[in-house]
Image: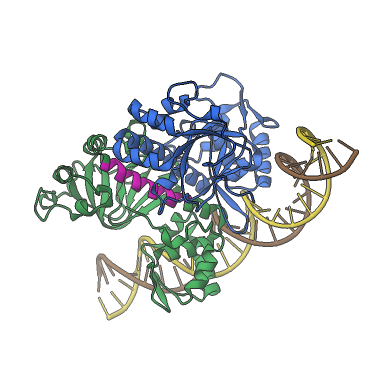
Chain colours: A blue, B green, C brown, D yellow
DNA sequence: CGAGGTGTTGAAAGTGCTCAAATGGCGTGG
DNA sequence: CCACGCCATTTGAGCACTTTCAACACCTCG
């Protein structure tokens, strides 16, 4: 088990990657992030002045559940898994985030500002690291920031609701089908659609609450039922309508799966 | 299937139940609610002036998923189930709320302000009904309200995370054990603890994502494994330590189950 | 080439679900 | 007060799905 990274003294921070006020070093992320929408420029600049771009490597633990929280994180590039682990080594994957998404915000409201889950880079990743105290200060003063965070949390909540529904009502092949739908572009080209699985199948399995073996078998079942083409992590869907019906026939229907994506 | 109540024209609102500015009709709820913490009295009074106390009966549908949202709701007394239903009649229970808890807030951030799940009274219930537009107006202007809602949503999120972990890592008897722990007072008397199930076992089963039959069998397994006393909806636990170990041995441990309760 | 990680496949064992039927409590109407 | 019917709960039997354990194929990297 690798020790949690202490990003405050991370040796990985090259000076050129320090955010500066105006230059190319300032993450465009901060300006375009939905979370920061409507925030006065002065606040964005204050954030920019105090945040850092930090690279982490595949497998690195960014923080662990129970750690005292020092930072919030925004993914500049890469993939991060949020999971809770038990003593006996099994884990429950709560989220898998990618570019532009915020994580660590659980600590804002937890007792004693500790993280409530563990964040691990599942690929080489560049993080924008925002000091928690700074964020807390502005959260009190800037309604726009509170509203942005509300929007973010509300989006998460919707995804969780859907996941809970999925786990309750669907079997493994259907859950996978639903996941595939959410990977599709909203406006599909006519004819075949090619879906690229964003990370390894073991993690996909974990995210959907099943074992890797189950995932493998369920996917091949999906393949034979819907005549999918599967080549490594590329999946070709010839009949989207059939996929939708297969995966979401048992959904609540309030929210077609394709409308639901992780918001930032 | 009963039609959704239209609480705007509900015949159930007796004049005496209309909230007034200063009198005994004003729900003390509004003053003490954590959600409203730190809110200026003027805003609380504005809310009080425009909200209504509305009784609903067991089984009434308060709103349905997909409905255009008119109101937020706070439970004055009673129990409300939040669930998503499929066309074929099965449902996934997302939450079961009681006194002092807010629901319907999903609509604040959903596309077009629609509810994303269905709310049903599972017992005779009195609701405090707050017009959504009024709430939205103040949400923009009052940082304290945004922060209160953030706290509420963050608490929900934690419960969802735990539920997801529970579904992923635990079997039926353990999930029930975990639920029982959360019903216990935090400081327990030495010796036996008597737990009262708050509503019927079918709903409990649904809330934990299992069938009533499975719940029944799992509970009796728990009974024989831990020497519980079960009489109707009263459960006597003689060995709390054993229950904790049984139910939460496989938890992530970041959050002992007993610390987690639904916040308002 | 060998090692390790990733993914697939097979067989056996659980675990929970479905369907069916019995039990028991409770309120209503007689 | 009792009989009845309704509903929640329990119990049984069989089945479907998922997990577990084991073995193997495949790929990449050193």
Give the quarter of the image for residue A56: top right
Compared to residue A74, the image places residue A110 above or below, namely: below
Q: Looking at the picture, how far across and down is residue A178, in whole percent? A: 54, 37
Decide which of A62, B220 is in the foreground and name it: A62
Q: Looking at the picture, how far across and down is residue A98, in whole percent? A: 54, 33
Q: Residue at x 50, y 70 (%)?
A: B243
Give the quarter of the image for residue A79: top right
Q: Residue at x 44, y 40 (%)?
A: A131
Magenta stretch contains residue B149: yes
* Residue B104 seen in the figure: no
Q: Looking at the picture, how far across and down is residue B88, in whole percent? A: 46, 43
Decide which of A214, D3 is in the foreground and name it: A214
* Residue B41 seen in the figure: yes
Q: Residue furthest top?
A: A190
Give the quarter of the image for residue A219: top right
Q: Residue at x 22, y 37 (%)?
A: B138
Range drawn in magenta: B144-161
Left or right: where does residue B154 sit relative to residue B4? right
Decide which of B149, A115 is in the foreground and name it: A115
**Dividing the image into 4 quarters, which one contains the C terminus of chain A?**
top left
Q: Residue furthest front?
A: A15
- Helix, strand or loop: magenta stretch: helix
């Amino acid at each position: 088990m690798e020790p949690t990274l202490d990003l405050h003294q991370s040796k990985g921070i090259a000076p050129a990657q320090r955010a500066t006020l105006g230059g190319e070093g300032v993450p465009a992320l901060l300006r375009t992030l939905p979370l920061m929408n409507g925030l006065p420029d002065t606040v964005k600049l204050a954030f920019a002045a105090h945040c850092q771009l930090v690279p982490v490597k595949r497998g690195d633990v960014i923080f662990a559940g129970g750690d005292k929280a020092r930072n919030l994180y925004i993914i500049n590039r890469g993939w991060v898994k949020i999971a809770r682990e038990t003593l006996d080594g099994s884990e429950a994957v709560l989220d898998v985030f990618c570019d532009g998404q915020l994580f660590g915000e659980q600590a804002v409201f937890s007792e004693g500002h500790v993280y409530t889950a563990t964040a691990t880079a599942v690929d080489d990743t560049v993080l924008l690291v925002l000091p928690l105290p700074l964020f807390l200060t502005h959260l009190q003063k800037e309604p726009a920031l509170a509203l942005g965070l509300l929007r973010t949390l509300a989006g998460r909540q919707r995804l969780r609701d859907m996941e809970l529904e999925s786990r309750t009502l669907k079997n493994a092949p259907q859950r996978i089908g639903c996941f595939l739908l959410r990977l599709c572009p909203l406006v599909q080209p006519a004819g075949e659609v090619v879906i690229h699985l964003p990370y390894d199948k073991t993690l996909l399995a974990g995210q959907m609450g099943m074992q890797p073996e189950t995932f493998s078998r369920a996917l091949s079942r999906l393949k034979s039922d819907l005549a999918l083409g599967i080549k490594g992590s590329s999946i070709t869907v010839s009949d989207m309508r059939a996929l939708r019906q297969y995966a979401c026939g048992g959904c609540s229907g309030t929210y077609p799966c394709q409308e639901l994506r992780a918001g930032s």
